[in-house]
Amino acid sequence: MSEDQLLCGKTIGIIGGGQLGRMMATAARHMGYRLIILDPKPNCPAAQLADQQIIASYDDIDAIKQLGKVTDVVTYEFENVDLESAQYLAQLGLLPQGTKALEMTQDREKEKHMIKMLGQPVVPFQMVRNLVELKRVMKELGLPAIVKTCQGGYDGKGQVTLFSESDIAKVEVLLQEEDRLIYESLVNFDCEISVIFTRSADGKIIYFPIAENQHRDHMLHMTIAPARVSQNIFDQGREAAKVIANALGVIGTFAIELFVKGTDVYINELAPRPHNSGHFTIEACNISQFEQHIRAICRLPLTPVVFHGGAVMVNLLGDNLDPYFSKIDQLERAHIHIYGKDQIQAKRKMGHLTFVDPNRDQLLMTLKDQQLI
Ligand code: ADP
Ligand code: MG
């Protein structure tokens, strides 16, 4: 044991109290840590499982100072937290993840340039600041394309897909609010995958099984693990992850989303935290992405990952809660997760279901037969 290891009884602060914070909190609770959540929303999903909540916005520096005083270590549940707050905590030595990965992943322009600089494959893209540039880039990169805001986007928010010049008007709306946008080619991919791993402070990387992700309206709908891709794609995904993780000095759980087309992969985006497509690890592996994250930030040794063979995770949005629960008698194999959000909304992530079986293809067939997927 070394002095900087944080054992049970210590207090972990989490900035952001949504479902990712809640699942981190669940893992940390099992391990005997105390938890304090900072989130503007009273009784947010993570706070329901914590010892205390500081109700404040992420950039409220007094609240951040208070969080620093009462915690032994701090982490964040997603990348849209305030960078200056994170820098303050990092200076106090309370944020083992540091701020480099956060800074890069908060801004799609910085993120994509960094990935390119590291020699890793990204979808062709260019920056667009006004209508003239948009029209020029549209000629250069062609259609169809997708235009994205650089900051604050998640679950497809801040994105416009362009199929013809008549869609320019939709980008004009975005340009009224944003000073720069990313224009990227729309990839006709075979599938999407994610590489999720945890890196320890001493640079050791442990991977989770690579997941295959199906989106609806740009939001994750279903994850299938392991992904139905070749070993070569697995190797490319993990190699890219390693290069990026080492360059950013990642500590904790981290996810890389990729598009697979033929024998090639393209990195779509990075997430410096546990990821929706890794929820299956809670029941389908001997250790979850959340527990491994807590281990990393508390400097406990990482656990070698053992996978039970196959898993399917389905997100429960507001509008598919009733359809699934009306089939509750068929859900005997489903691990049910509900996040404790106050209001049900159609496109809001309310929970998820995970099905585990040693045989992925058998599991997929059974779930299809039962019309559960
Ligand atoms: P978010 O931060 O909202 O997750 P992403 O860039 O990951 O943003 O986009 C969400 C989803 O939209 C992707 O998972 C993918 O399904 C689709 N998408 C995004 N960019 C492209 C692209 N260039 N080509 C094809 N599909 C894309
Ligand atoms: Mg994404």
Image (tube, grey):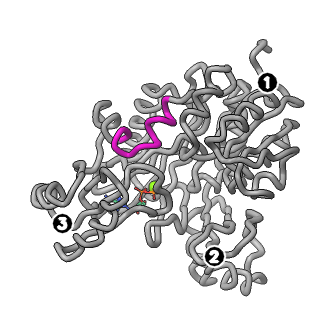
Q: Label 1, label 3: how many angstroms apart (C-alpha)?
A: 52 Å
Q: Which residues are magenta?
A: 100-111
Label 1 near label 2: C-beta < 8 Å? no
SS at circle 1:
loop
Question: N-terminal of the two: label 2 or label 1?
Answer: 1
Q: Would you say 39 lies left or right of 206 here?
A: right
Confirm whether residue 210 shows in the render. yes
Query: Which residue is drawn at the image coordinates 64% and 44% (left, top)?
Result: 58
- Tell me which amino acid carries mark 2: Gln
Return the residue nearer the eye: 44 or 231: 44
> Quadrant of the image for the N terminus?
top right
- The residue under label 1 is 6
Q: Would you say 290 lies left or right of 236 here?
A: right
Q: Tell me where residue 316 appears, x and y as whole percent.
A: 64, 71
Q: Would you say 158 lies left or right of 144 here?
A: right
Q: Tell me where residue 96 appears, x and y as whole percent.
A: 64, 26
Q: Nearer the viewer, mark 2 or mark 1?
A: 2
Q: From the viewer's perspective, is residue 271 above or below residue 85?
A: below
Q: Is residue 292 magenta?
A: no
- Tell me which amino acid carries mark 1: Leu
Return the residue nearer the eye: 300 or 367: 300
- The residue under label 2 is 345
- The residue under label 3 is 143
Q: Tell me where residue 333 appears, x and y as whole percent.
A: 74, 70
Q: From the viewer's perspective, is residue 227 above or below residue 51?
A: below
